[in-house]
Amino acid sequence: MKPAFPSIQRIAYEGVNSKNSLAFKHYNAEEIVAGKAMRDHLRFAVVYWHSFRGTGSDPFGAGTMQRPWDDGSQSVRNAQRRVRAAFEFISKLGAPYYCWHDRDVAPEGKTLAETNRNLDAVAEVLKAEQQRTGIKLLWGTANLFSHPRYVHGASTSCNAEIFAYAAAQVKKALEVTHVLGGAGYTFWGGREGYQTLLNTDLKREQEHLAKFLHLAVAHKQAIGFKGQFYIEPKPKEPTKHQYDSDAAACLNFLREYDLLPHFKLNIETNHATLAGHTVQHELEVAGAAGALGSIDANTGDELLGWDTDQFPTNIYLTTYTMLTVLKYGGFKTGGVNFDAKVRRESFEPIDLFYAHIGGMDAFARGLKIAAAIRQDGRLAEFVMQRYASWDAGLGAKIEAGKTTFRELEAYVLKRGEADANVSGRQEYLENLINEFI
Ligand code: XUL
Ligand code: CO
């Protein structure tokens, strides 16, 4: 096969003074930051669905993407050729991981058996390319939302036949992820939600979702797959309300149905903002529960209300993201997965490089800045001091559960008034962050 990106060499790190738009200015894979190589901190992944299946179509117009290696057909041969183009891209970029949905990599056939054969035929090429390049699978997932059969959802469909089909599909996707040595497997609830409560038995649907995930855990154990399971919260789109609406809702659901030991969260930036949160909030909620697993890195547009999935270039965003990731001990099985798409207007193959280089450099800067802020120590010290009243005496006693309302009332009555508060110093702290940006 002819190279898909003939004019592009391996993207090199050239440092901050480089004017080469096809070089990294900040991402230096080998460079040690806070005791670890940048490659191992960030664990970058390229998504197959946007970068190799995205056409650039929108509700108002047809696809625009120029992808000369792709003949546009639904053939297995075309799918296999696409894999080779994708691996040429990912290895020239120098990202260590990639992620897929089953239906991104291989075409759907007329029956499930044919579809599974197609997937196996493409998975063989994926495996060969992984071995040739050393690129690894960060996670796999099943597309349980594009086909019309999933119109009412997959595991939460009102039609039990559809639950069975989805189960069969996830079974296969899990097995292929296992064969390809995936470090994880993600469940994003594509259409697991509702458009109207008028036709929806919410309780029953949520129970079915939990049942489905328990069956997935059982199959994972049956095949000996050791990768991490993730749930990816998103509040809406395509449905009006998705059951996995945000990190807190997911954690509550997982706890309620005894699934928490088996799952961590895959937090996506633009999903956080759709839910009315910042990504740092979602990461903190996940981290506090010991469930910070992975990140789908992208960004929305503050003037648009939907999931625009743009590449992240905002240094504050990546700094705050990495501050929380480092605080909770960094990625174990997860990584920074670019669930982002080039704009419809950025239709040339080279734009895929500009987009990923920009995202990787933005995260590399965020990592270095976050590490410097942690090294400096003033921010952490400030937070520690802010809670000093809990470290001894009254506060320590309350935290240890060794008091009662009666005793606390007596304490306050005796003193007459509580100790004065100290300023939260938000502006001082924002200035402190700016010292490092
Ligand atoms: C959709 C989304 C998905 C998941 C995988 O908004 O983020 O691509 O990441 O199904
Ligand atoms: Co995502």
Image (tube, grey):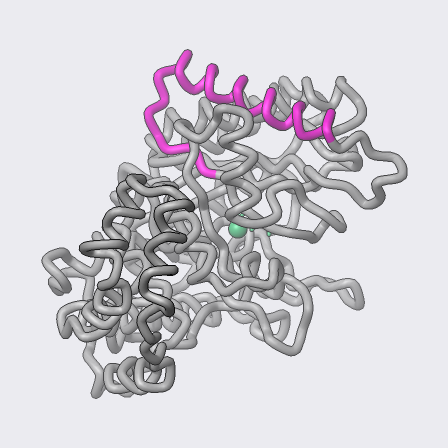
Q: Residue at x 27, y 63 (%)?
A: 387
Q: Is residue 108 magenta?
A: no
Figure check: 353 above or below 53: below
Image position of 35 (left or right of 25):
left
Outermost residue toward the right in this view: 198
Outermost residue toward the front in this view: 414
The one nearer the camera, 167 or 263, is 263
Q: Write the start and end of the magenta stretch as one range.
A: 203-230
Measured as percent of width and height from the top left, residue 136 is found at 31, 41
Measured as percent of width and height from the top left, residue 265 is found at 44, 43
The one nearer the camera, 130 or 47, is 47
Indicate the quadrant where residue 424 lies.
bottom left
Image position of 201 (left or right of 292):
right
Q: Is residue 217 magenta?
A: yes
Q: Residue at x 77, y 67 (%)?
A: 61
Measured as percent of width and height from the top left, residue 371 is found at 20, 67
Majority secondary structure in the magenta region: helix
Indicate the quadrant where residue 180 lies.
top left
Which quarter of the image is occupied by the C terminus? bottom left
Figure check: 166 above or below 66: above
Image position of 19 (left or right of 78):
left
Q: Residue 433: in sight, yes or no? A: yes
Q: Residue 125: in sight, yes or no? A: no
Q: Residue at x 54, y 41 (%)?
A: 250
Figure check: 328 above or below 194: below
Image position of 70 (left or right of 57):
left
Figure check: 222 above or below 410: above
Q: Residue at x 34, y 50 (%)?
A: 335
